[in-house]
Image (tube, helix red, strand yellow):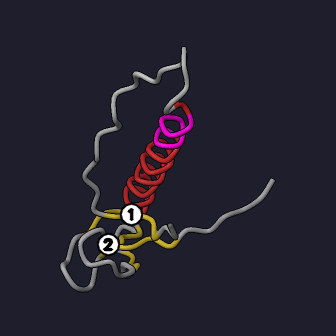
Amino acid sequence: MSEHLLKMICAECRISPQLSTNSEGEEWCTCPTCGVADTKANAVAEMAAHVTEVSARALQTGIRRSLRGTKGLRFDGKPIPQGSYRFIAELNS
C-alpha cells in the first residue's frame, strides 16, 4: 500500500491554513488571509470530497476521450458538477 500526502489550502486564497486548538481541545483550520475557518475534521473531510470530485472528473474525461470516435460504444454519463469548497487539496496537474 502506498501513501500519498496532500497539502491542504484555502480554496479562495490558495495558501495553507493555520492550525490552532480552541479551549475545548478541538483543532481548527483557519485561513490567515480571508479568515475562513472550520474544525480540522470538517476541513479534512471537505478536502477529501474535493479530491474525490477531481479524480472522478478526470476519470470521466478520460473515458469520454477514449470512446470518442469508436463505433458501437458511447458514454452517456452526465458531467460531474463542480462543487463548492472552502478547503481543497493542492493538486499537481
- Relative to 85, 42 lies left or right: right
Q: x%, y% of residue 4?
A: 66, 64
Q: Which of 43 and 73 is in front in this view?
A: 73
C-alpha separation, residue under disc 1 versus residue under disc 2: 6 Å
Q: Nearer the viewer, residue 73 or 13?
A: 73
67 w.r.t. 13: above or below: above
Residue ID at (72%, 62%):
3
Residue 59 within the magenta-colored segment of the rendering: no
Residue ID at (53%, 35%):
63
Extreme-left residue of the structure: 34
Any mark on residue 56, and which?
A: none
Q: Are marks 1 and 2 in contact (CB under 8 Å)?
A: yes
Q: How crowded is mark 1: few (under 14 residues within 10 Å), some or many (20 or more)?
A: many
- Relative to 90, 78 lies left or right: left
49 w.r.t. 15: above or below: above
Q: x%, y% of residue 57?
A: 44, 44
Q: Nearer the viewer, residue 73 or 15?
A: 73
Residue ID at (38%, 60%):
43
Q: Name the residue under label 1.
A: 88
Q: How many labels does the image show?
A: 2
Highlighted range, magenta:
60-66
Extreme-top residue of the structure: 72
Q: Nearer the viewer, residue 92 or 32?
A: 92
Q: x%, y% of residue 75?
A: 46, 24
For residue 28, what is the image quadrant? bottom left
Q: Mark 2 points at which residue?
A: 10
90 w.r.t. 46: above or below: below
Element type at mark 2 = strand
